[in-house]
Amino acid sequence: MITLAVETSCDETALAIYSDKEGIIGEVLLSQAKVHEQFGGVVPELSAREHTKNLLPLLKVLLDRTGFDLKRVDFISFTLTPGLILSLVVGVSFAKALAYTLKKPLVPVHHLEGHIYSVFVERPIEEPFLALVVSGGHTDLYLVEGFGKYRFLGGTLDDAVGESYDKVARLMGLGYPGGPIIDRLARQGEPKYPLPRPMIDDPSLNMSFSGLKTAVRKIVEGGNYSKEDLSASFQRAVLDVLEAKLLKAVELTGVKRVAVVGGVSANSELRERFQKLTEKGIISAYIPHPRLSTDNAVMIAYAGIERFKRGITAPEDINPEPNIPLETFGRYWS
Ligand code: ATP
Ligand code: MG
Ligand code: FE
């Protein structure tokens, strides 16, 4: 079974050809970071235009590189939700045109389901497991009972962690995306600044990161600060909260296997911390390769194959939505 997957939910234009037997046949990914850098964040209208411009040339590159005959594709997988609506519209339209031309079915995928199952591209996790989704738009904890069966346990009440990395980087004038830059600077600094750990003692699994960003802003506005030390302090505060909430989720559910996914799971200190907890036997962390942490089409292909195996295809008039909750999507489409 072979699928071609289309991912355009945010600022990466990505395509992948994936086989359930052979794994990745080929993939292409074009980041728009350079386009959005000067604005300090993604500009939705520019993102949609970049996807429109680049999808067809990227498909040609993918086919040239792999020598793959598009007729061998069994179905087209695509990200239906969540994401920037204009950007999703471009990818969904592209997927529909391909499916119509090739006379193949369309399979809708939830972007967060893609992130969660990105781990499975390398090795499966025994279900049930917990999923900590830490990305540009989401910071959520789920209990995954099986493919398509997601139970929301808690999440951020305001900023997502990736979003707060990007905002803090912008405050310090560091560029976009902020995550990898702060990750690098933090390694050269010490967590010297006392920053809050919002909601860390709250009994729920909810989180909040906007206060942390405000605390960083005050230090930046005070002038004469070390970017390295402030990066290290911010990152330490974020990871303290994530770890505390994750351990609370493990305690509440009795489930120790955890998929840590989404762009922020590429973070080096996060990986080290969850690795240490795994070595101590406190949790069993599964973190995708950094290439699979940030947006890509391989994860969409993987989830698409799982959906297709369950007989799920999209009607011709399917339309993207900016934000269908993962729980709802799982129930509706499984
Ligand atoms: P969502 O998946 O919620 O729809 P998104 O697709 O925009 O949002 P991803 O591509 O999964 O998000 O992740 C992008 C985010 O990951 C950005 O906010 C970026 O700063 C962050 N990020 C990437 N690498 C790192 C890193 N090494 N450390 C911390 N954050 C990182
Ligand atoms: Mg991105
Ligand atoms: Fe994402």
Image (cartoon, rainbow, N blue to C red):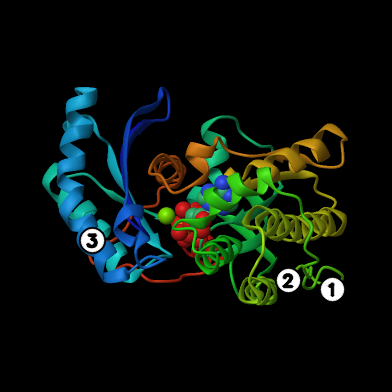
Q: Amino acid at mark 2?
A: Asn
Which one is in front, 241 or 331?
A: 241
- Which of 18/140 is in front? 140
Task: Name the mark on residue 206.
Answer: 2
Left/right placement of residue 304 relative to residue 212 reads left
Which residue is farthest left? Answer: 101
- The residue to which callout 3 is attached is 90
Secondary structure under badge 3?
helix
What kind of residue is marked 3? Answer: Val
Q: Which residue is mark 1?
A: 202
What distance separates the C-alpha of mark 2 from that of mark 1?
A: 8 Å
- Tell whether 72 sits left or right of 15: left
Report the residue at 51% width, 61% height from top: 136
Estimate the x, y position of residue 282 in percent, counting from the top left: 87, 42
Is there CB contact under 8 Å for labels 3 and 1? no
x%, y% of residue 118? 52, 41
Quadrant (top left/top right/bottom left/bottom right) for the N terminus: top left
Which kind of residue does numbered mark 1 sit on? Asp
